[in-house]
């Protein structure tokens, strides 16, 4: 049982990787539980999944520190982008930094759709609001309480701005009226890590998939993935000599939620919902 994030599922990456894995290991079936990183970590803590592929570095570090997994192992990365209406009424295109763009959005009360679900993307969004020293609140700020694909559809319908991973945006680009407006900044790097929960019921089987993903074959499968057959690789394998992410702003690595943040996210979510496939 693999607990993975909505962005790996919505972009098509997860299906691609599992299909490649099964070419080498047809005797093993990988079942997936798709959820935001926060919920996925809870599933790992309770033993409901045997392996985690998540992208919330601060929450992952706390998970390891609490003794729920022996280590956090970065395995791949892509990039976040701030997307919005092609006309860009807030004029954030080409902003010096994501936090500068967020400050502009808050100052002008331009529509923004948050996932509001304690996912890795939600954590990163909150870090940008903090870095911008603004509090996102009011009628212009909408929490979907849903995964990345649904959140993008809401933003497109409302002609609002949104933080998303580039791969999911590319996967849905044909049905969305959104452009990537802010991208390429170091703080937009989005690192996905493997964690092997101590509570796992099938740790030996999970280790086979984890080892394959870190292997040459797994790394090639990550690098070869293309969204809808496009020319660009939107995910990359983590450099094998790097044990952990470095070079990112500490405020963005320490992606914890305040009590107020958590309450708002829980209110938006309602009862947990995840996909099993």
Image (cartoon, rainbow, N blue to C red):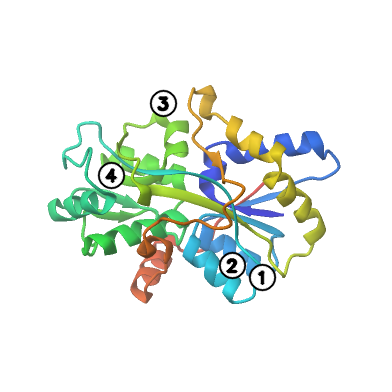
User: Mark 3 sits on what residue?
Assistant: 174
The spot of residue 182 in percent (x, y) is: 29, 41
Q: Residue at x 35, y 56 (%)?
A: 125
SS label for mark 3: helix
Residue 92's disc is none
Determine the CA span between mark 2 and mark 1: 6 Å
Q: Can you see residue 116?
A: no
The N terminus sits in image quarter: bottom right
Q: Are marks 1 and 4 in contact (CB under 8 Å)?
A: no
Q: Residues within 10 Å of mark 3 (few under 14, many from 20)?
A: few
User: Mark 4 sits on what residue?
Assistant: 161
Please give left or right for residue 223 compared with residue 277 in the image.
Answer: left
Residue 42's disc is 2
Q: Are marks 2 and 1 in contact (CB under 8 Å)?
A: yes
Determine the CA span between mark 1 and mark 4: 35 Å
User: Mark 1 sits on what residue?
Assistant: 46
The spot of residue 71 in percent (x, y) is: 64, 65
Q: How many marks?
A: 4
Q: Are marks 2 and 4 in contact (CB under 8 Å)?
A: no
Determine the CA span between mark 3 and mark 2: 34 Å
SS label for mark 2: helix
Please give left or right for residue 48 compared with residue 258 in the image.
Answer: right
SS label for mark 4: strand
């Amino acid at each position: 049982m693999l607990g993975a994030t909505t962005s790996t599922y919505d972009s098509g990456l997860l299906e691609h990787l599992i299909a490649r894995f099964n070419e080498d290991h047809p005797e093993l079936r990988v079942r997936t539980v798709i959820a935001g990183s926060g919920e996925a970590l809870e599933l790992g803590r309770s033993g409901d999944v045997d392996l985690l592929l998540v992208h919330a570095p601060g929450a992952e570090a706390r998970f390891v520190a609490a003794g729920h997994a022996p280590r956090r192992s970065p395995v791949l990365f892509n990039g976040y982008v701030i997307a919005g209406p092609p006309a860009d009424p807030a004029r954030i295109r080409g902003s010096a930094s994501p936090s500068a763009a967020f400050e502009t959005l808050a100052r002008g009360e331009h529509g923004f759709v948050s996932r509001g679900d304690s996912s890795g993307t939600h954590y990163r969004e909150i870090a940008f609001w903090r870095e911008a020293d603004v509090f996102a609140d009011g009628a212009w700020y909408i929490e979907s309480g849903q995964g990345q694909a649904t959140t993008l559809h809401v933003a497109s319908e409302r002609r609002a701005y949104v933080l998303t991973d580039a791969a999911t945006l590319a996967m849905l680009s044909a049905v969305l009226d959104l452009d990537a407006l802010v991208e390429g900044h170091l703080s937009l790097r989005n690192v996905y890590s493997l964690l092997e929960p101590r509570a796992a019921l099938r740790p030996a089987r999970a280790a086979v998939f984890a080892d394959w993903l870190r292997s040459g074959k797994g790394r090639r499968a990550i690098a070869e993935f293309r969204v809808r057959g496009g020319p660009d690789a939107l995910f990359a394998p983590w450099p094998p000599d790097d044990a952990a992410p470095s070079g990112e702003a500490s405020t963005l690595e320490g992606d914890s939620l305040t009590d107020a943040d958590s309450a708002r996210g829980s209110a938006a979510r309602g009862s947990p919902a995840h996909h099993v496939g």
